Image (spheres, grey):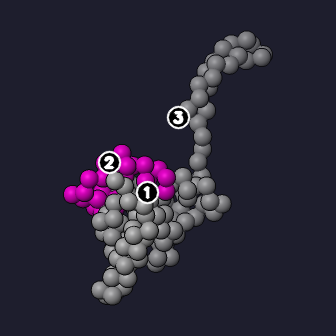
Amino acid sequence: NSIRRRRECINCGRRFTTYEIIEEVPLMVMKKNGRRELFDRGKLLNGLLRSCDKRTVPMSVMEQVVNDVERDIRNEINQEVTTDRIGELVLQQLKDIDQVAYVRFASVYRKFDNIDSFMEELKALKKLDAKKPKRS
């Protein structure tokens, strides 16, 4: 991811090569306990891998989710993002990709305290699914 340029010194006429790279501002994640750490694509992909375990979601789709989430975060003005925001972005995409993976990810991310809150999430997902046009 660099641009190679051939240049010439205006004083001595000697030619040389330079390489330009984009310097990205580090993206910081604000954890629930108040700590900050660098955004780690690997952690996000591992969470998706666990959620999609034994499902038919291709690796390329999971990688695209990670790319989309990182792009969305970087497009926001603030270079600091909460784990809640990351989780919501992932859930938005998983909802359309695989509902079982969505529920698995939500169960870890949302930390349901009881079966009732878990059931509410399932009902909301089912209601959303009923609104989708059925493919024939």
Q: Secondary structure at mark 3?
A: loop
Res. 117 in view: yes
| Viewer-side residue, 23 vs 8 | 23
Q: Which residue is mark 2?
A: 59
**Whole-percent x and y of residue 84?**
48, 72
Query: Does label 2 or label 3 sit earlier along the sequence?
Result: 3
- Contact (Cβ within 8 Å) of mark 1 with mark 3: no
Q: Which residue is mark 3?
A: 1
**Whole-percent x and y of residue 95?**
40, 64
Q: Across the whole image, how many numbered discs are drawn on residues?
A: 3
Instruction: Give, as a single range, the part of the protein colored magenta.
Output: 47-69
Mark 2 or 3: the one toward you = 2
Q: Secondary structure at mark 1?
A: loop
Magenta region, mostly helix, strand or loop? helix
- Contact (Cβ within 8 Å) of mark 1 with mark 2: no
Q: Alpha-carbon distance for marks 1 and 3?
A: 19 Å
* Residue drawn at point x = 62 percent, y = 59 percent: 76
Q: Amino acid at mark 3?
A: Asn
Q: Amino acid at mark 1?
A: Asp
* Residue drawn at point x = 59 percent, y = 29 percent: 3
Whether residue 42 is in magenta: the answer is: no
Mark 1 or 2: the one toward you = 2
Res. 37 in view: no
**Whole-percent x and y of residue 125?**
39, 72
Q: Which residue is mark 1?
A: 40
* Residue drawn at point x = 61 percent, y = 55 percent: 75
Q: Amino acid at mark 2?
A: Met
Q: Alpha-carbon distance for marks 1 and 2?
A: 18 Å
